[in-house]
Amino acid sequence: MITLNAICIAALVAIAPAIASAGTTINVKLNDKGDGMDMSKMMGLGMGMHGDMKAAPMSITVSNKFAVGGKVTFNVSNTSKSMIHEMIVAPIKDENTALPYIDAENRVDEDKAGDLGEVSELDPGKTGSLTLDMKPGKYILYCNVPAHYAMGMWAVLEVK
């Protein structure tokens, strides 16, 4: 006699490969408070810079701060009405260490940070996507348009 549990287990075994290959989708929004910001007074808000993040004029918001290892797709939207933004993915060890920064250029040194991929310069209101094969660990998503990272435009994603 076949039990209901046996049928459920058989169904899960049958669909498991499809679920595993589907991967994780993370919706990412690139945000700013608009043209009226005094950007000169809002630096020092990059990861590990220990500024007051409540004052951040820019941010990256993610639909989920966790993903399953394997294929991760980032659907990125620039919600700004006037500014270009981008999203770069890099591995990190912890959230208390700032990324390598080029002060003269007001941006992260992408090569030293370990850039894994990006959705480049999105005009206001535009979207883009990126799919990466990700291993368990912590990653930062950040905008590297000059000064944006230091004004709080970053988020952390943990892949399990």
Image (cartoon, rainbow, N blue to C red):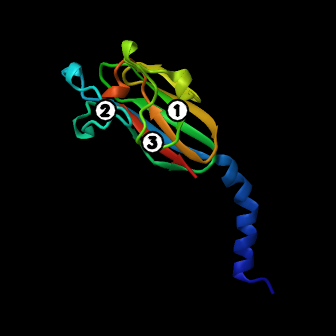
As drawn, 88 above or below 52: above
Q: Quadrant of residue 37?
A: top left
Q: Nearer the viewer, mark 2 or mark 3?
A: 2
According to the picture, the residue beneath numbered tag 2 turns out to be 45
Quarter of the figure that contains the N terminus: bottom right
Cα separation between marks 1 and 3: 10 Å
Instruction: Residue at 42% x, 26% y: name it.
Output: 143
According to the picture, the residue beneath numbered tag 1 turns out to be 89
Toward the right, the furthest residue is 1
Q: Is residue 4 left or right of residue 43?
A: right
As drawn, 16 above or below 51: below
In the rendered structure, which disc, 1 or 3, sits on the residue that comes first in sequence? 1
As drawn, 139 above or below 36: below
| Circle 2 SS class | loop
Q: Amino acid at mark 1?
A: Val
Q: For the residue carrying disc 2, how many other residues have a C-alpha within 10 Å: few (<14), some (14-19), or many (20+)?
A: many
In the rendered structure, which disc, 2 or 3, sits on the residue that comes first in sequence? 2
According to the picture, the residue beneath numbered tag 3 turns out to be 156
Instruction: Residue at 47% x, 40% y: name it.
Output: 27
x, y (%) of residue 30?
38, 31
